[in-house]
Amino acid sequence: MENIDKYQLIDIRSVDAYNGWKENGEAKGGHIKGARLLPYKWLHYIDWIEIVRNKNILPDDPLVIYGYDRARAEEVARQFERAGYPDVSVLNSFSEWVEKDYPMDDLERYRQLVSADWLNQLITTNNAPEYDNDRFVLCHAHYRNPSDYEEGHIPGAISMDTNSLESTETWNRRSPEELKETLEKAGITHDSTVIVYGRFSFPNNDDPFPGSSAGHLGAMRCAFIMLYAGVKDVRILNGGLQSWLDSGYDITKVPVSNFRVSFGVDIPQNPGIAVDLEGAKAILAAPDKNLVSVRSWREYIGEVSGYNYIEKKGRIPGSVFGDCGSDAYHMENYRNLDHTMREYHEVMESWEKIGITPDTHNAFYCGTGWRGSEAFFNAWLMGWDKAAVYDGGWFEWSNNDLPFETGVPEQ
């Protein structure tokens, strides 16, 4: 296609194909450089047009739709035309684009974000693309809610309570000795491939333990702590249990437990990705580093603390607002409607506007570490090796009689 730069390209393949997985046998994974993600799956969502507008895809933009299936691309093109987009066309052949080695882009660590189809292949055949191991452990993450696992989990998954990896007093990661005990009991060695997922069940702040319904957010926390400990190959099921169900796969109530193993190396192997209180203070004092508050606006300006067990309200002075979404148990600004991780270009663009860039040491925090861990993974998956989590977050800061601010900050 001539003058491709004047068009807004729309990729209607899966989130995972967009990120880099070769789902149709193509020689090169990823998406056409500059393309926006709008999976065909979303076409039947009632708020499809709202998704389009939130991506800043405007009626004045000349659009080119592409995917693996031309019929589906034409269906999406017709939907755009019905929505008032006058200049919409379909790319003749995505495979031809790949074969001609035209500009492509991908998520640097796309392998660590896997699809339900990939996971099903691994479970059923003990093999899958971009997997060269002979040992994997699948973890169904939850917070103090064993019934979440018992009511249905992916076949072969073990139960992983976040409380086994983080302290119930400080909500920080547990000691190296405690982490070693948990991981070894779960059958996890440093060279295991570990896939983590959780169930999203619409958390309610009025519940005594809202986090019990935010299992996939808890999975991000587990994955971060495992990476910190030294598990070399930590992967996340993109979209959590919902993506497994959306793909038509069955769940089971049959419990699974693993044989105890030796972790094999000292813990932690990656201490630099976790920042403690003194490290957070040092970041605030440094002009070339960011302490990023991955909290809601109401938490950030001190209208609410965000948690029923945190009394103080406000923010850490000098922190950058990273806007998680609506409250302490939701990450709307980092996820798509199907709970898959948001198009990474969009996250990068929103971060760049507030000075969060890959060359900067960015430590993400929230109330107790869950949302900070998910934001960290967004950066880490993009290959940002200076990213970290301030583990203690607002819970630790507010309990140490340190300065804090409320209200809308001055620009």
Image (cartoon, rainbow, N blue to C red):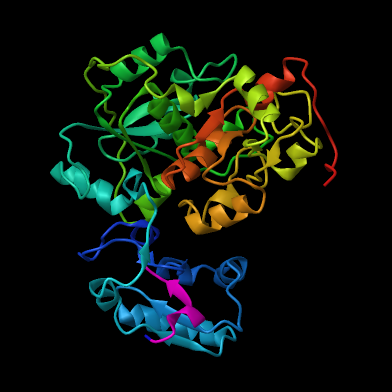
15 or 244: nearer the viewer: 15
184 or 268: nearer the viewer: 268
**Place of residue 107 in the rendered image (x, y in percent of width and height, measured from the top left):** 39, 53
**Horizontal arrangement in the rendering, residue 96 relative to residue 284 (left or right):** left
Q: State whether residue 178 appears in this view.
A: yes
51 or 385: nearer the viewer: 385
In this view, 357 is above or below 179: below
Q: Residue at x 61, y 52 (%)?
A: 352
In this view, 355 is above or below 85: above
**Horizontal arrangement in the rendering, residue 248 relative to residue 361 (left or right):** left
**Horizontal arrangement in the rendering, residue 123 relative to residue 379 (left or right):** left
- The quarter of the image holding the N terminus is bottom left
Q: Residue at x 26, y 39 (%)?
A: 155
Q: Residue at x 69, y 29 (%)?
A: 284
**Place of residue 187 in the rendered image (x, y in percent of width and height, measured from the top left):** 26, 22
* Residue 5, magenta (yes or no): yes
262 or 41: nearer the viewer: 262
Task: State which region is magenta.
Answer: 2-13
**Place of residue 303 in the rendered image (x, y in percent of width and height, measured from the top left):** 81, 37
- The residue most toward the front is 287
**Place of residue 275 in the rendered image (x, y in percent of width and height, measured from the top left):** 55, 24
* Residue 28, magenta (yes or no): no
In this view, 253 is above or below 107: above
Q: State whether residue 147 appears in this view.
A: no
Q: Residue at x 36, y 78 (%)?
A: 72
**Horizontal arrangement in the rendering, residue 126 relative to residue 32 (left or right):** left
- The residue most toward the top is 177
Question: Residue 269's quadrant in the figure?
Answer: top left
Numbered circles on residues, count: 0
